[in-house]
Image: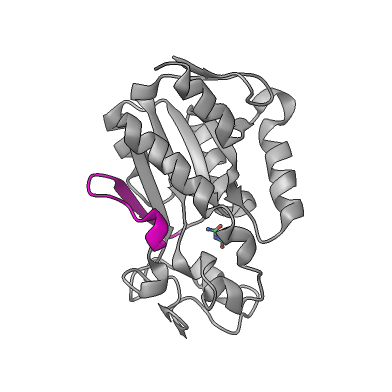
Amino acid sequence: MITVAAAQPFPFAFPPDRTALIVIDMQRDFIEPGGFGETLGNDVSLLSAIVPTTARLIGLFRAQGWTIIHTRESHAADLADCPPAKRTRGGPALRIGDEGPMGRILVRGEPGNDIIPELAPLPGEIIIDKPGKGAFYATALGDILRLKGITHLIFAGVTTEVCVQTTMREANDRGYDCLLIEDATESYFPAFKAAAIDMIRAQGAIVGWTAPLAALEAAVKGTR
Ligand code: C5J
């Protein structure tokens, strides 16, 4: 076991061979200027600020040979997996499936739907295309984790209070111990990120643990 001593609300211990990193939705449309996120009026520089930390986290897992899973929020080209309620909510100028600055919004295979080049998955890393906010809903993630014997999950990605928190809650209900890396997750709304982190670790880790990347790095270094 490796123990992240500085995790909150108390140390997080994980067995590396039964642990996976899940990097949520680090896609061009959420993170790059000119993408879907920006067309919604968001300041995407908040999200791009975590790219170097997330790259370091992925690099740490690659160096150790540990399991890495990437997710993309995405829909089929015919939108058969997009509930009308999701498509029409809020009356946005550009809806899911519409032609946007980087191709059709949140449609699989479009340029904007891709993971940003800085964090591109390597061969052998798992990619989960998910039509919902949570990565377990309508995907094979649960089966994949079960077949690999995974019991612990380490999370990064965007946005903290939407897809990251939803997936952590889904994972928590399924019995996984979950750690969120605080400086490898971000929101368009700093107050929402802070609140999500507080909620996750409240009441004795009711959803999971949180820690800065340096705390995980120190824990891993201690095992070498
Ligand atoms: C994600 C969103 N990935 N905020 N999506 O959080 O709509």
Q: Tell me: residue 94, above or below residue 73.
A: below
**Above or below: residue 80 compared with residue 206:** below
The image shows a total of numbered marks equal to 0
Comparing 143 with 177, the one in front is: 177
Horizontal side of 15 relative to 207 (left or right) equals left
As for residue 208 lying within the magenta part, the answer is no
Magenta-colored span = 116-131
> Is 129 within the magenta?
yes
Residue 192: horizontal and vertical position, in percent? 72, 52
Q: Residue 60: horizontal and vertical position, in percent?
A: 41, 35
**Can residue 96 be seen here?**
yes
Residue plotted at (40% across, 68% down): 113
| Residue occupying image coordinates x 57% and y 71% | 37
Scheme of colours in the image: one colour
The quarter of the rendered structure image containing the C terminus is top left
In this view of the protein, which residue sits in the foreground, 79 or 92?
Answer: 92
Q: Is residue 79 visible?
A: no
Residue at 69%, 49% (x, y): give it.
193
The N terminus - image quarter: top left
Image side of residue 78 versus residue 183, left or right: left
Residue 165 position (above or below residue 81): above
Task: Provide residue 75's location: percent of width, then percent of height.
Answer: 39, 67
Residue at image x 48%, y 75%? 96
State the residue in front, 125 or 120: 120
Image coordinates for residue 57, horizontal then vertical, percent: 46, 40
Answer with the quadrant where ligand 1 appears in the image: bottom right
